[in-house]
């Protein structure tokens, strides 16, 4: 896919005002085109099959076809489409199920406009071919990639500490090294740069962008 081709998006949400707002936000973004919209699961699938978009923005709770079934069918019938699930929930079991079903990422409905745009650009196939910072591939150590994967899934320093059985000070030290190596200024920026550089692929990870502070 050419890096100068617009990222094509379908928006699916059963709340008219929220859907209209998300559509307007995306349509106003340079390099992004909204190709369709839907208010239920069946409509989301139909709109996706009609437009074959790069990204489907999919509300986690809509009438009709359950979200997990919608994700599965979208990926089976439009494999070039990436799914970004929009949710109000922070339930780990739910988010794990969404990622297991094949969603590329999830983002909170409380996310900022910039975070939503960042999620779309990150998961879109076209974004993978954009120019990356001139850094060597696999600049992160295996442990740093492991920490980076957990950061991208929205885990706090405390949660990462528990997950990896290391001290919080060690987590913070890894964060400092990660930021320095990637030239990042924030968690969101670090996730974006790591994704672009292929660090998650190097780690063999199924890591996906999540809302990060």
Image (spheres, rainbow, N blue to C red):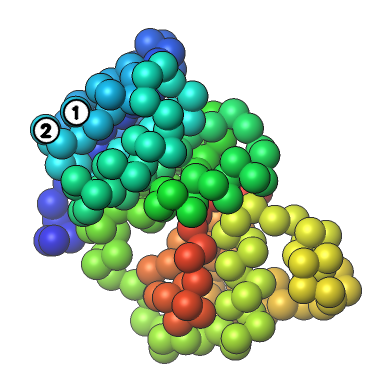
- Image position of 16 with respect to 134: above or below: above
Helix, strand or loop at mark 1 = helix
**Residue identified by numbered label 2:** 50
Give the class, few, some or many, for how many residues have Cα within 10 Å of label 2's Cα (few <14, many ≥20).
Answer: few
Query: Residue at 38% of width from left, 37% of height from top?
Result: 69
Q: Is 27 drawn above or below residue 172 in the view shown? A: above
Nearest the viewer among 45 and 35 is 45
Q: Residue 145 falls in which quadrant of the image?
A: bottom right
Residue picked out by circle 1: 46
Of the numbered discs in the image, which one, if any, rests on residue 102?
Answer: none
* Observer-nearest of 183 and 138: 138
Query: Image check: 10 left or right of 59?
Result: left
Query: Which quadrant would the N terminus be assigned to in this image?
Result: bottom left
Disc 2 + disc 1, Cβ < 8 Å = yes
Q: Quadrant of residue 167?
A: bottom right
Rendered location of residue 47, percent (x, y)? 19, 28
The image shows residue 54 at horizontal and vertical percentages of 23, 47
């Amino acid at each position: 896919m050419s890096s100068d081709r617009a990222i094509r998006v379908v928006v699916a949400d059963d709340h008219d005002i929220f859907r209209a707002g998300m559509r307007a936000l995306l349509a106003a973004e340079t390099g992004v085109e909204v190709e369709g919209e839907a208010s239920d699961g069946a409509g989301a699938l139909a709109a996706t099959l009609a437009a074959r978009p790069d990204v489907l923005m999919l509300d986690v709770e809509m009438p009709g076809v359950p979200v997990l079934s919608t994700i599965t069918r979208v990926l089976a019938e439009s494999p070039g489409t990436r799914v970004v699930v929009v949710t109000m929930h922070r339930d780990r079991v739910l988010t794990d199920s969404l990622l297991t079903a094949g969603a590329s990422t999830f983002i909170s409905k409380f996310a900022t406009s910039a975070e939503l745009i960042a999620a779309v650009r990150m998961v879109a196939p076209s974004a993978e071919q954009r120019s990356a910072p001139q850094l060597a591939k696999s600049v992160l150590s295996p442990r740093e990639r492991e920490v980076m994967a957990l950061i991208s899934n929205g885990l706090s320093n405390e949660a990462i500490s528990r997950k990896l059985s290391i001290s919080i000070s060690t987590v913070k030290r890894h964060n400092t090294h990660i930021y320095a190596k990637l030239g990042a200024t924030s968690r969101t920026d670090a996730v974006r740069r790591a994704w672009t550089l292929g660090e998650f692929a190097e780690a063999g990870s199924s890591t996906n962008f999540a809302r990060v502070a």
